[in-house]
Image (cartoon, rainbow, N blue to C red):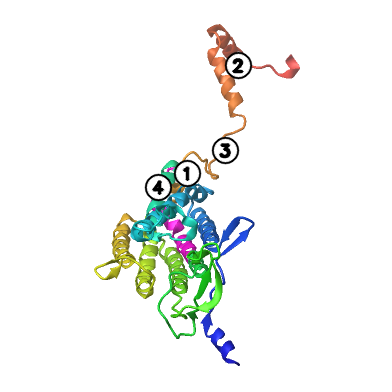
């Protein structure tokens, strides 16, 4: 085996580019990964919701509100915590609107997405914590799929490493805009620190593990009242804490730690407290409480087909004059004669 082959097998190569064009239309791997993650989350959430006794199609209705709210929230969090990228001398504030160039904060996406989900749940007359429990594994799987977008964008990686799974990072060049490496194509030249820790891959694997733990615990202990969602938050933030410490991309710091590290710590503590307190609310929500208002249940007995004519007949008798009703009553009380005597 020659040296080049050994080097290739000992590292993970990055894609040559993350954006392709069909005519003037850009096809972005980052956006495709986000869309794929949303589809998986809705599919899994729908299955879990109906298995718990909820109305079919409810998760899609919730997603109509939660997804756009979540995308706005994710972008807002990114712009606020990394405002130096968009505001200040030499910066273009309009770039903050270019969500297709990457930059979504999961914390903001979950927070504002929950607002959208709350609106949808109230319209349906169902409890938000129960819906959150059904969606939890799908959300963290969607996050795992979304991390593949970071792989195509060559972003959010760690420091140099000689481990066999080190990630190769290449220079990218965009002829239209030499400063826009995100939309560029690889030159084949590796950056000085390459290979690096593939922190996107670490988080991807961790997220899939969290999804399996939540599904297992939810099935075994019949978690309810938002406890499955709290378990997801605690599990995800525990991993995000140590993975965030490995990243070398620029970020704002508070007391020597990255902002996202502090966020992970606070959310982990809040999730653990909620998980403990929610246990006092008793067993999982009853299936009938998850059925959307205004939607007839399949197990409800149908009204007899001949009930309407009977009701109409009784109404006609009640509305008839007293003499007619008396005559009808007299005929009903007469002793009928045998056919042979007629």
Q: Earlier in the sequence, mark 1 or mark 4?
A: 4
Q: Which residue is mark 3?
A: 302
- Provide the major secondary structure of the magenta segment: helix
**How far from the left and from the top, in percent, is residue 325?**
56, 11
Q: How many marks?
A: 4
Residue 284 in sight in this render:
no
**Vertical placement of residue 78 versus 152, above or below:** above
Q: Are marks 2 and 4 in contact (CB under 8 Å)?
A: no
Of all residues, the one furthest to the top in this rendering is: 323
Q: Quadrant of the image for the C terminus?
A: top right
Mark-to-mark CA distance, 1 and 4 = 14 Å
Spatial distance from mark 4 to mark 3, Cα to Cα?
32 Å
Q: Are marks 1 and 2 in contact (CB under 8 Å)?
A: no
Disc 1 marks which residue?
292
Q: What distance separates the C-alpha of mark 3 from that of mark 1?
A: 19 Å
Which of labels 3 and 1 is toward the front?
A: 1
Marks 1 and 4 in Cβ contact (< 8 Å): no
Which is more foreground, mark 4 or mark 3?
A: 4
Foreground label between 1 and 2: 1
The residues colored magenta run: 125-144
* Mark closest to the chain's N terminus, 3 or 2: 3
Q: Nearer the viewer, mark 3 or mark 2?
A: 3
Q: Which residue is mark 4?
A: 118
- Residue at image location 43% in from the left, 70% down from the top: 156
Sequence-first tag of 4 and 3: 4
> In this orientation, which residue lies closer to the viewer: 304 or 90?
90
Q: Nearer the viewer, mark 2 or mark 4?
A: 4
């Amino acid at each position: 085996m020659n040296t080049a082959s050994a080097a290739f097998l000992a590292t993970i190569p990055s894609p040559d580019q993350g954006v392709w064009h069909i005519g003037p239309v850009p096809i972005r791997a980052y956006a495709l990964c986000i869309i794929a993650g949303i589809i998986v989350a809705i599919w899994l959430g729908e299955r879990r919701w109906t298995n718990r006794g909820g109305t079919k199609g409810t998760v899609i209705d919730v997603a109509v509100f939660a997804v756009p709210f979540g995308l706005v929230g994710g972008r807002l969090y990114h712009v606020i915590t990394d405002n130096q990228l968009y505001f200040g001398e030499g910066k273009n504030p309009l770039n903050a609107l270019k969500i297709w160039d990457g930059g979504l904060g999961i914390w903001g996406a979950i927070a504002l997405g929950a607002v959208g989900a709350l609106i949808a749940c109230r319209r349906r007359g169902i409890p938000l914590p129960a819906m959150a429990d059904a969606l939890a594994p799908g959300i963290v799987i969607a996050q795992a799929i979304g991390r593949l977008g970071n792989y195509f964008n060559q972003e959010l990686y760690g420091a140099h490493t000689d481990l066999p799974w080190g990630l190769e990072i290449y220079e990218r060049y965009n002829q239209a805009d030499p400063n826009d490496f995100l939309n560029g194509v690889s030159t084949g030249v590796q950056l000085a620190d390459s290979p690096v820790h593939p922190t996107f891959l670490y988080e991807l694997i961790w997220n899939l593990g969290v999804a399996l733990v939540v599904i297992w615990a939810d099935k075994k202990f019949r978690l309810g009242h938002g406890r499955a969602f709290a378990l997801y938050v605690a599990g995800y933030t525990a991993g995000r804490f140590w993975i965030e410490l490995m990243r070398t991309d620029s970020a704002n710091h508070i007391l020597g730690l990255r902002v996202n590290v502090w966020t992970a710590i606070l959310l982990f503590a809040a999730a653990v407290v909620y998980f403990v307190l929610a246990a006092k609310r008793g067993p999982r929500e009853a299936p009938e409480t998850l059925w959307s208002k205004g939607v007839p249940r399949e197990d409800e007995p149908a009204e007899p087909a001949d009930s309407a004519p009977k009701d109409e007949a009784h109404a006609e008798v009640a509305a008839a004059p007293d003499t007619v009703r008396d005559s009808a009553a007299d005929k009903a009380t007469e002793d009928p004669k045998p056919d042979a005597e007629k």
